[in-house]
Image: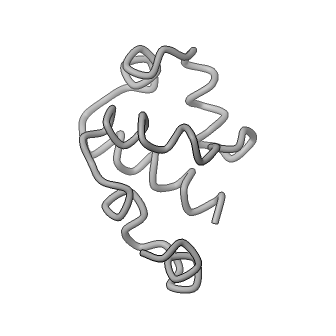
Amino acid sequence: MALAICRSVRAERARNGLTQSALAERLGVSQSTIAAMESGTRRVYAHELPDICRALDTTLAGLLHGAPEADLRALGI
C-alpha cells in the first residue's frame, strides 16, 4: 500500500503541474521530504493524507485511483 501512495502522490502532483518544491510549500515541509515520500524512502502516514489531498485538490479515493484492489478494500474504499 505504501508504494501505491508514493506513486499516487507523484502522479497527482504532476497532473496538477506542481513541482516538488511547490507541493512542499503547500504542506509546510521541505522539498527533500516530498522527494523521499515519492521515492518511497519516507512513509506517508495516515494523519498526513488529509493535508496531502487538500494540497493536491483531490480526495483520498482520487489519490488512490489505480491502487491494487486488495489495498482499496482493506481501506474500505
The quadrant the C terminus occupies is bottom left
**In this picture, residue 39 sits left or right of residue 64:** right
Task: In this rendered view, identify the residue nearer to me: 19 or 29.
Answer: 29
- Outermost residue on the right side: it is 41
Residue 54, image x and y in percent? 31, 36
Residue 51, image x and y in percent? 42, 34
Total count of labels: 0
User: How are the colours assigned in the image?
Assistant: one colour
**In this picture, residue 50 sits left or right of residue 31:** left
Residue drawn at x 63%, y 21% as measured from the top left? 32
Quadrant of res 39: top right
Residue drawn at x 52%, y 55% as measured from the top left? 7
Task: In this rendered view, identify the residue nearer to me: 30 or 51.
Answer: 51
Residue 62 higher or lower than 39, as above or below = below
Quadrant of res 13: top left
Residue 56, image x and y in percent? 31, 38
Residue 55 higher or lower than 65, as above or below = above
The quadrant the N terminus occupies is bottom right
Task: In this rendered view, identify the residue nearer to me: 70 or 50.
Answer: 50
**In this picture, residue 64 sits left or right of residue 41:** left
Quadrant of res 14: top left
Task: In this rendered view, identify the residue nearer to me: 38 or 59.
Answer: 59
Residue 1 higher or lower than 59, as above or below = below
Residue 16, image x and y in percent? 24, 39
Residue drawn at x 48%, y 72% as measured from the top left? 67
Residue 5 higher or lower than 70, as above or below = above
